[in-house]
Amino acid sequence: MSPESVTPTRRAKLHRRVRLIVAFTITWNVIEAAVAIGAGVAASSKALIAFGLDSVIEVASAIAVAWQFTRKDPERWEKATVRAIGIAFFALAAYVSIDAILTLTGVEQVDHSPVGIGIAVASLVVMPLLAWFEFRTGGELGSKSVQADAKQLLLCVYLSGAVLLGLLLNTIFGWMWADSVAALVTAALALREGIEAWRGDVESPLEVLDDLKT
């Protein structure tokens, strides 16, 4: 169904769905940020701290979309909201890159973090489903801001995988540098997504699932 063919009743329902999605996103990410940052500080893990900060930015992104969809004419605020999400990506990439590089030059001790591993695994389960659901909703509405927010959620999936790999390599092999490398991978992904959001070039974050749909 194209955005132009969506009826006013269906559009109102989709607007309510967006508000529910962002409410869940905000709640989940507030908890995720608190756990990840706390575990990251305790273990001196830059990747976990970056993971927590990404959750904070996801909250900001979700709030921007929530604000947009409380307006009478959400489409009017589309471009500004997408740009705000792009700026959030850039901020994350800059902070994580600087912090990870400084850590690599001084290689400080990174402790094991079972709590960090647990929150990364939980995110790998929840975030892909939420991102897919939000992207489909945004596609039906023709809303690039909702789709950009879905890509923010998908970045959390990439980040969860990178963080989990870094934590496991440190736990199993004692490779402390893997933590900072995982953080730098996250920064590169954030930069790419920020550029795409800034340009308004928002493609499906789950192309494989989209292909299966059709």
Image: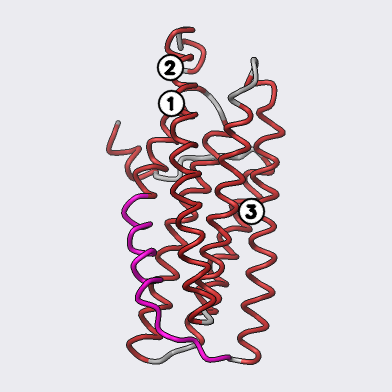
Crowdedness near tag 3: few (<14), some (14–19) or many (≥20) residues, C-alpha within 10 Å: many
Query: Where does the image place residue 113, in percent across and percent down from the top left?
Result: 40, 78
Q: Is 122 within the magenta?
A: yes
Which amino acid type corresponds to the residue marked 2 in the rendered image? Lys
Picture quarter with the C terminus: top left
Disc 2 + disc 1, Cβ < 8 Å:
yes
What element does badge 1 sit on?
helix
Residue 127 percent location from the top left of the image: 39, 49
53 sits left or right of 19 in the view: right
Q: Amino acid at mark 3?
A: Phe
**Residue 58 in the image: above or below residue 16:** below
Give the residue at mark 1.
17
Horizontal arrangement in the rendering, residue 79 relative to residue 63 (left or right): right
Assess whether residue 106 is covered by the magenta stretch.
no
Instruction: Indicate the position of residue 132 as horizontal and vertical percent values.
Output: 38, 40
Identify the residue under disc 2.
13
- Other-residue count near label 2 (Cα within 10 Å), few / some / many at <14 / 14–19 / ≥20: few
- The answer for how far apart the CA atoms under marks 3 and 2 are is 29 Å
Residue at x 38% of width, y 36% of height: 133
Which residue, given by chain and number where applicable, does mark 3 sit on? 89
Most common SS among magenta residues: helix
Q: Which residues are magenta?
A: 108-126
Image vertical order of residue 178 relative to residue 199, above or below: below
Mark 1 surroundings within 10 Å by alpha-carbon count, few (fewer than 14), some (14 through 19), many (20 or more)? some
